[in-house]
Image (cartoon, rainbow, N blue to C red):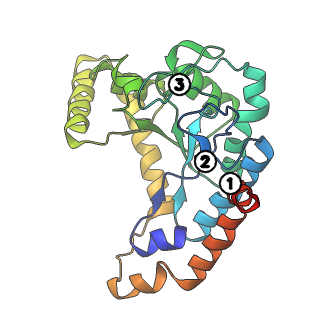
Amino acid sequence: MARELKSVGININFSPVADINTNPKNPIIGRRAYGSTEAEVSKFVSAAVRGHLTEGVQPCVKHFPGHGDTTVDSHLALPKVTTPLETLREREFRPFTKGFKSGCALVMTAHIVFPEIDPDRPATLSRKVLRSLLRDELRYKGLIISDDMEMQAITDHFGADEAPRMAIEAGCDLLIYRSEKAARLAHAALLQALEKGTLAPEIVLTAAERCRSLKRESLLPYRDVVVANVMKAISTPEHAALMAELTAKLPSAQATSKA
């Protein structure tokens, strides 16, 4: 996967999913997860991270602190996960920490409220989750990026002007917006917050330095795509054979073959 991405000029991939699919009623994670146990998800997350880094692509584990135990799609509403904090530490956090130890320097947040940690704000907007837990307790030093800020878990509950400021203050270094219009509005809101003094410039400068550090250490120098070589690197017979082998080992494929 990483080799093909790099061949077309992509050097960051918002993958792998580090969520554990512990809730069969989860409407959004499901087969996006590597499995339903901490052990299998941690194993595959670590392997995916190492594989990406070997090929020169920076991976991003997601969605911290874990999206596997939800019954609501955060694209459409604001989920709550009432799992006890100790269970989160022993289960949900581990695939993320294994990914960090394997060299992953990018993590994506979840638009989910965890009442055991912060009853008022989703992880993306929570200092308790991103600073106290992720930075201080887990000692994560890399870059924190939000999930899409245009998802309804954010837009239906927090203002378009306030949400980007809250995310940056909480600890996000980068914000995702899927449309240029919303991105420009968020940028203008952040500039206004800086001018009014409601957003401390030190927070922005620290986030900017983390971004520059990741670029220096992992993404530069950027190599232009050699178009003539692209078709030699993507959809090769070797890659197709590997995909077929892996797909055949999926539990769903095995269940179908026995039916």
Number of on-image labels: 3
Foreground mark, 3 or 2, reads 2
The secondary structure type at the circle numbered 1 is: helix
The residue at which mark 2 appears reads as 31
* Contact check, label 3 and label 1, Cβ < 8 Å: no
Query: Seen in the image, is 126 located left or right of residue 20?
Result: left
* Contact check, label 1 and label 2, Cβ < 8 Å: yes
Q: Position of residue 130 (x, y in %)?
A: 56, 28
The residue positioned 42% from the left and 24% from the top of the image is 153
The residue at which mark 3 appears reads as 112
The residue at which mark 1 appears reads as 252
Residue 69 position by quadrant? top right
Relative depth, front residue between 230 and 100: 230
Instruction: Work out which residue is located at the far front of the displayed protein and give it.
Output: 259
The residue positioned 63% from the left and 44% from the top of the image is 18
Report the amino acid beneath label 2. Answer: Arg
Mark 1 and mark 2: Cα distance apart in space: 10 Å
Within 10 Å of the Cα at label 3, are there few (<14), some (14-19), or many (20+) other Cα atoms? many
The residue positioned 41% from the left and 84% from the top of the image is 231
Within 10 Å of the Cα at label 1, are there few (<14), some (14-19), or many (20+) other Cα atoms? few
Report the amino acid beneath label 3. Answer: Ile
Q: Position of residue 19 (x, y in %)?
A: 64, 40
The residue positioned 35% from the left and 83% from the top of the image is 226
